[in-house]
Image (spheres, rainbow, N blue to C red):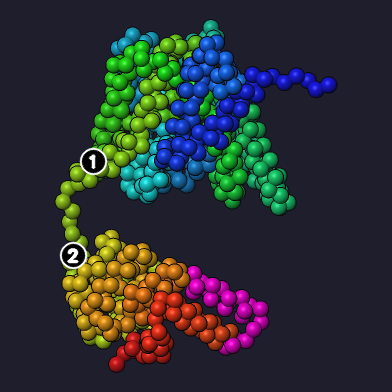
C-alpha cells in the first residue's frame, strides 16, 4: 500500500509551478518583468495575501500557499544558482578590465549608501546592529531586473549600461561578506563580536581555500571526462553536482551555501566549459530563481499599504532619491557625463533582491523585528517594481542634460560629385566589401553613410566615404547622381532601401540601381518600384552554400560555377516576372559594362 502523501506540501508546490506556467507568461505579454510577476504573485497568493482568508473561504486552500516553509528549501537553491551565475560572470579577466568602476565607483557607492541609509534608520530608533544590516542590504540594487531592462532596450553596450553593470558587479561581490556579517551578528556565542568576526574570517578563508584547491584539481578534469561521453544528461548532472556540491561543502563549514556556489562559478568561469554550463543550467536557474522571488513576494505584507501609506510612500521616494543623488555625485567624480550619471542613478536607486536574502536571514536569526522586516521589504519590492518606469524616465530625461557636441570636421566635408561613377549607399560590412571590389576593378565610386560615429573613423583610414542621408534628393544631387552610372544600395533596413530607390528613380529613370534585399518577397517589391537588380540575401546564401557543397562533393568547378550563374539568372527572371516586369531590363552583361571605367 502506497504511503500517504503530504497534500499541503504538494498543493503549495502546485501553486508555485502554476505561477511559473501561467502568471509569468501572461505578464510577459504586457512587457512586465517576470521578476515582478513572481513578486506580485507571491504577495497575492502567499500566507499574508489571499492565504490569510482560507478560514473564511476554504476553496482558497488550493489556490494559495499555506505554509512558506513548504517551498523555502527549493527557494534557497534559487539563491545558490543565482550566486553561481554571478560567479561565472565575474571572471578575473572581466574584473581586471573593469576594476576602476567596479572597485572604485562600485565600492564607494555601497559604502556611502549604506552609511547614509543606516544613519537614517538609526534616527528612527533602530539599534546599531539593525541599522547596519538595513543600510548594507538597501544599498544594493536589483541585478536581475536592471540587467533585464538594459538588455531589452539594447542599452548594455552604452556608457550608462557598462557603468550600471560595473556597480552591480561590485554589489554582487559584496553580497557574500554581507551574509557572513549577518551570520556573525546572529551567532549566540558568549565571545566578543571581534572574536566572532576573526573566527568566522579564518573559518571562511580555510573553507574557501579548500573549495578552490579541490575545484582546481577536479572540476576541469570532471567536465572533460563528462564532455567526452557526448551525453547531455551527464553534463547536466555534472553541472548540478558542481553547484550543489560546492554549496554543501560551504554549508559543512558553517558558511552560506551561496558562498560555495559563488566560488565554484568563479573557478568554472576560467574554463572552456563556461558557455556550455550557462546554457545547461539556464532552465534550472530560471525556475529556481522564480520560486525564490515567489517566496520573497510571500514576505510582502499588502496590509502595510493600508497601515502606514504616507510613511511607505516617503520611504520609497526617500530610498530612490538618496541612492540616486549619491550615485550622481560619485559618477561625476569619476568623470562620467551628466546624462550617464542620471541614467545610472535612476537604474540603481531602487532596492534589490538581496535585501530579501539579507534581511530575511537577519529576521530568522532574531536580529530584525518582524514588523520592521515586513515594512522594509515592502518598500524594497515597490522600488523594484518602479525600475522599468525609472529606466524610461532616465532615457527621456538624460538627453536634456547633454551639452553641445563638437562636430567632427570629417562630417562636414561635402561629396565631391563626379561623372561616370557609382554611388554606394551604406558603408557597413557589406558596403565595405563592395567598395573594396570596385577599387580592385578600377571602378570609380563615392560611398555615403549616415553613421556619424563610423564615417570619421573610416575617412581617417583612407576610405572615400561621406556623411549624409541618401534619402534626400539634395544630397543625392551633391553626390553627382545626375552624372553617375549606378547606385548600389547596401543598407539592411527595408524602409530605408525603399526610400533611397524611390528618390533615385525619381531623379533618374535611366540609372542602374543594384540593391540588397532581405529575401525573395522583398526583391520582388524592389523590382516593382524600379531597381535594376535586386540581390536577396537568402537566395545568395543558398547559392553560395550549393556551390561550396557541389565542389566539395567533387564536381568540376567550372561546371558548378556555370550552373550557379544559370540558377541565379533563373531566380532573377522569376522575381522580375512576379513583380510584373516584362523582361525589358538590361541584361547582366550590359549591367556589368556600365560599371567599368570609361
Task: Decide which of 86, 529 is in the foreground and name it.
Answer: 529
- Give the residue furthest to the bottom: 598
Q: How many marks?
A: 2
- Asked if the magenta segment contains residue 545, the reply would be yes
- Residue 422 is situated, as x and y percent measured from the top left of the image, at 30, 81
Marks 2 & 1, CB-CB < 8 Å contact: no
- Residue 487 is situated, as x and y percent measured from the top left of the image, at 30, 78
Q: Main secondary structure of the magenta part?
A: helix
Element type where label 2 sits in the image = helix
Report the side of 253 relative to 92 (left or right).
right
306 lies above or below 16: above
Quadrant hosting residue 355: top left
Q: Residues within 10 Å of mark 2 (few under 14, many from 20)?
A: few
Q: Residue at x 65, y 37 (%)?
A: 240
Quadrant holding the N terminus: top right
Report the side of 140 relative to 59 (left or right).
left
| Residue of label 1 | 397
Task: Decide which of 558, 324 is in the foreground and name it.
Answer: 558
Give the spatial CA distance, label 2 vs label 1. Answer: 29 Å
In magenta, the rendered stretch is 538-559
Quadrant hosting residue 414: bottom left
- Residue 346 is situated, as x and y percent measured from the top left of the image, at 30, 35
Mark number displayed over residue 409: 2
Q: Residue at x 28, y 85 (%)?
A: 510
Kindly tell me whether residue 83 is visible in this rendering: no
Quadrant holding the C terminus: bottom left
Kindly tell me whether residue 276 is visible in this rendering: yes
588 lies above or below 11: below
Amino acid at each position: 500500500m502506497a504511503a500517504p502523501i503530504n497534500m499541503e506540501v504538494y498543493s503549495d508546490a502546485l501553486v508555485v509551478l502554476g505561477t511559473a506556467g501561467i502568471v509569468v507568461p501572461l505578464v510577459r505579454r504586457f512587457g512586465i518583468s517576470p521578476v515582478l510577476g513572481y513578486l506580485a504573485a507571491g504577495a497575492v497568493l502567499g500566507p499574508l495575501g489571499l492565504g490569510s482568508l482560507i478560514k473564511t473561504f476554504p476553496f482558497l486552500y488550493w489556490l494559495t500557499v499555506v505554509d512558506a516553509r513548504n517551498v523555502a528549501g527549493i527557494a534557497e537553491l534559487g539563491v545558490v544558482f543565482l550566486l553561481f551565475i554571478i560567479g561565472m560572470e565575474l571572471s578575473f579577466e572581466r574584473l581586471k578590465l573593469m576594476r576602476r568602476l567596479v572597485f572604485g565607483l562600485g565600492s564607494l557607492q555601497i559604502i556611502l549608501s549604506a552609511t547614509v541609509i543606516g544613519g537614517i534608520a538609526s534616527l528612527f530608533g533602530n539599534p546599531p546592529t539593525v541599522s547596519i544590516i538595513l543600510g548594507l542590504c538597501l544599498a544594493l540594487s536589483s541585478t536581475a531586473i536592471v540587467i533585464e531592462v538594459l538588455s531589452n532596450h539594447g542599452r548594455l553596450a552604452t556608457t550608462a549600461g557598462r557603468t550600471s553593470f560595473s556597480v552591480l558587479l561590485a554589489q554582487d561581490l559584496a553580497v557574500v561578506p554581507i551574509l557572513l556579517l549577518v551570520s556573525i551578528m546572529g551567532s549566540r556565542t558568549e565571545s566578543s563580536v571581534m572574536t566572532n568576526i576573526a573566527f568566522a574570517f579564518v573559518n571562511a578563508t580555510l573553507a574557501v581555500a579548500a573549495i578552490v584547491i579541490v575545484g582546481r584539481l577536479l572540476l576541469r578534469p570532471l567536465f572533460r571526462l563528462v564532455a567526452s561521453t557526448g551525453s547531455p544528461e551527464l553534463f547536466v548532472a555534472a553541472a548540478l553536482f558542481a553547484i550543489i556540491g560546492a554549496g554543501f561543502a560551504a554549508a559543512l563549514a558553517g558558511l552560506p551555501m551561496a558562498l560555495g556556489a559563488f566560488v565554484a562559478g568563479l573557478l568554472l568561469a576560467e574554463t572552456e566549459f563556461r558557455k556550455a554550463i550557462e546554457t545547461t543550467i539556464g532552465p534550472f536557474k530560471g525556475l529556481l530563481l522564480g520560486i525564490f522571488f515567489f517566496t520573497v513576494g510571500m514576505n510582502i505584507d499588502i496590509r502595510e499599504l493600508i497601515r502606514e501609506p504616507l510613511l511607505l510612500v516617503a520611504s520609497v521616494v526617500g530610498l530612490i532619491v538618496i541612492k540616486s543623488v549619491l550615485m550622481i555625485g560619485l559618477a561625476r567624480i569619476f568623470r562620467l557625463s551628466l546624462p550617464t550619471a542620471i541614467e545610472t542613478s535612476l537604474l540603481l536607486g531602487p532596492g534589490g533582491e538581496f535585501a530579501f536574502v539579507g534581511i530575511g536571514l537577519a529576521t530568522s536569526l532574531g536580529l530584525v523585528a518582524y514588523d520592521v522586516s515586513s515594512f522594509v521589504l515592502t518598500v524594497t519590492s515597490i522600488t523594484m517594481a518602479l525600475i522599468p518606469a525609472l529606466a524610461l524616465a532616465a532615457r527621456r530625461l538624460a538627453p536634456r542634460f547633454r551639452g553641445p557636441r563638437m562636430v567632427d570636421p570629417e562630417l562636414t566635408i561635402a561629396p565631391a560629385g563626379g561623372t561616370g561613377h557609382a554611388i554606394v549607399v551604406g558603408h557597413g560590412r557589406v558596403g565595405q566589401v563592395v567598395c573594396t571590389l570596385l577599387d580592385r576593378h578600377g571602378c570609380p565610386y563615392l560611398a555615403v553613410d549616415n553613421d556619424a560615429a563610423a564615417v570619421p573613423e573610416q575617412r581617417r583610414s583612407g576610405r572615400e566615404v561621406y556623411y549624409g542621408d541618401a534619402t534626400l534628393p539634395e544630397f543625392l544631387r551633391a553626390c553627382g547622381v545626375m552624372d553617375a552610372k549606378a547606385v548600389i544600395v547596401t543598407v539592411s533596413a527595408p524602409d530605408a532601401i525603399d526610400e533611397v530607390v524611390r528618390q533615385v528613380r525619381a531623379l533618374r529613370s535611366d540609372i542602374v540601381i543594384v540593391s540588397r534585399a532581405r529575401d525573395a518577397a522583398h526583391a520582388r517589391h524592389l523590382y516593382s518600384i524600379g531597381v535594376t537588380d535586386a540581390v536577396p540575401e537568402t537566395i545568395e546564401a543558398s547559392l553560395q552554400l550549393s556551390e561550396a557543397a557541389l565542389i566539395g562533393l567533387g564536381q568540376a568547378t567550372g561546371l558548378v560555377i556555370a550552373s550557379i550563374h544559370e540558377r541565379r539568372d533563373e531566380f532573377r527572371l522569376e522575381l522580375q516576372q512576379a513583380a510584373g516586369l516584362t523582361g525589358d531590363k538590361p541584361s547582366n552583361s550590359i549591367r556589368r559594362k556600365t560599371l567599368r571605367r570609361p
